Amino acid sequence: MKEEQVRLTDEIVETAYGLLIKKLAFGGLTAKNEPAFQLEFGAILKTVGQLYEFRLIDKFNLEFETYISLNEKSIKSKSNRARVDILIKYQDDKTLTQAVIELKFFKKHNHREPNNRYDVFEDISNLEKYRKHNIDLCYFILATDHSHYVNQEQYSEDTGDFDFRHAKEYKSGNVLKYKTDKPYGDDLILNGDYRFNWEKIEDLYFLKVKV
């Protein structure tokens, strides 16, 4: 059944994510940038996913930096084709379940602020669109060694809308506006309600949002 396949796909992602963050935090894996973070996560996803090929007809595949088709323009690509970080396909001879994962890896020494915070909400906005176009599950995952995103006392009024610090909430329909003289991006409005719960392991912080 489709529902069971979706549940198993979610289980694969959750299991792989749990392994990833512990191995990164405790030194079992090393990722110094976002591409390396993506590759390490992909390797774990592939290993876990293949264990869920219980029958000969069960197939687990993933693609990196691939494109999906939309019926509307993506904010990121400005076209009807959107490039996603990771696309998962878990299927049998009758049913296909697809999941998209968008990743960010923010290093303290590359403090690209406040644009990084805008990019997080932009990714979530795009993931909401993907859910409308035959994508069953969508996840946003962020890793960082910089507490600025997690427990900074406050942000400037100009960019304070883009706030995903620990335990902060976003309510559906709220306008996120970049209020500087030259805005980095257009206003964003998300459809869902979100609560941002960070996990700290050793010197790293991790955020996972299921869209």
Image: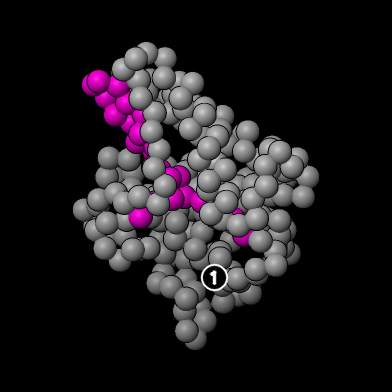
Q: Quadrant of residue 164?
A: bottom right
Circle 1: residue type: Asn
Seen at 40% across and 72% down, the residue is 186
Expressed as whole percent of the image width and height from the top left, the position of residue 48 reads 52, 27
Question: Is residue 89 or residue 148 the one in the foreground?
Answer: 89
Q: Which residues are magenta?
A: 83-106
Question: Is residue 140 or residue 84 the one in the foreground?
Answer: 84
Seen at 52% across and 29% down, the residue is 47
Question: Is residue 133 or residue 173 the one in the foreground?
Answer: 133
- In the picture, the quarter occupied by the N terminus is top left
Q: How is the image coloured?
A: one colour
Task: Tell me if I can see residue 10 in this picture.
Answer: yes
121 relative to 166 in the view: left or right: left
Q: Which residue is mark 1?
A: 115
Task: Count numbered badges in the picture.
Answer: 1
Task: Give yes or no for residue 202 being in the magenta stretch.
Answer: no
Expressed as whole percent of the image width and height from the top left, the position of residue 181 reads 49, 86
Q: Vertically, is 92 above or below 27? A: above
Expressed as whole percent of the image width and height from the top left, the position of residue 184 reads 47, 76
Pick out the residue farthest to the bottom. 181
